[in-house]
Amino acid sequence: MPAAATALTEAARGGVRLRALGEDEAARLIGSELVRRLRHYTLALYSHGVHHADSRGIILADTKFEFGRLPGGDLIL
C-alpha cells in the first residue's frame, strides 16, 4: 500500500460542508505545533487501524478522523 496521506479541513460555519485547508492556513488558524500533533495522532490511529484490519483480512482504504477541543482545551477524537 502507498504511504498514508493527511488532508486538513474545517467545518464551514453554520453548516456541515467541509472546507479544505492548506497546511499554512491551518497553522495560522490553530498553530503549527497543533497541526503537527494532529498529523501525528492521525497517522498513528490510521496505522493501528490498518494493522488491526489486516490481521483480519480486511483492507482499510479510507478513513476520516474528526478532532475537536473540550471547553478546557483538551483534544478529543
Image: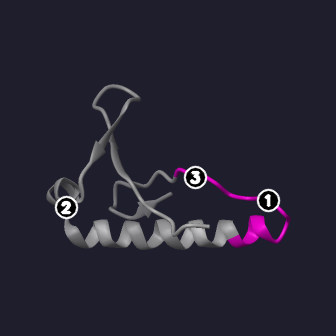
> For this rendering, which residue is in front, 21 or 1?
1
Residue indicated by mark 1: 58
Highlighted magenta segment, given as a residue range: 51-64
Which residue is at the far left?
28
Residue 34 on image: x %, y %: 29, 68
Q: Is residue 6 left or right of residue 46?
A: left
Kind of element beneath mark 3 = loop
Q: Nearer the viewer, mark 2 or mark 3?
A: 3
Residue 19 on image: x %, y %: 31, 38
Is mark 2 in CB contact (under 8 Å) with mark 1? no
**CA distance separating discs 2 and 3:** 22 Å
Dot placed on the residue nearer the N-terminal end, 2 or 3? 2
Residue 40 on image: x %, y %: 42, 73
Residue indicated by mark 2: 27
> For this rendering, which residue is in front, 74 or 6?
6
Dot placed on the residue nearer the N-terminal end, 1 or 3? 1
Q: Is residue 60 left or right of residue 70?
A: right
Q: Nearer the viewer, mark 2 or mark 1?
A: 1
34, above or below 25, in the image: below
Q: Which mark is residue 63?
A: 3
| Amino acid at the residue labelled 2 | Ala
Q: Is residue 20 left or right of residue 77?
A: left
| Amino acid at the residue labelled 3 | Thr
In which quarter of the view is residue 56 placed? bottom right
| Amino acid at the residue labelled 1 | Ile
Which residue is at the far right?
56
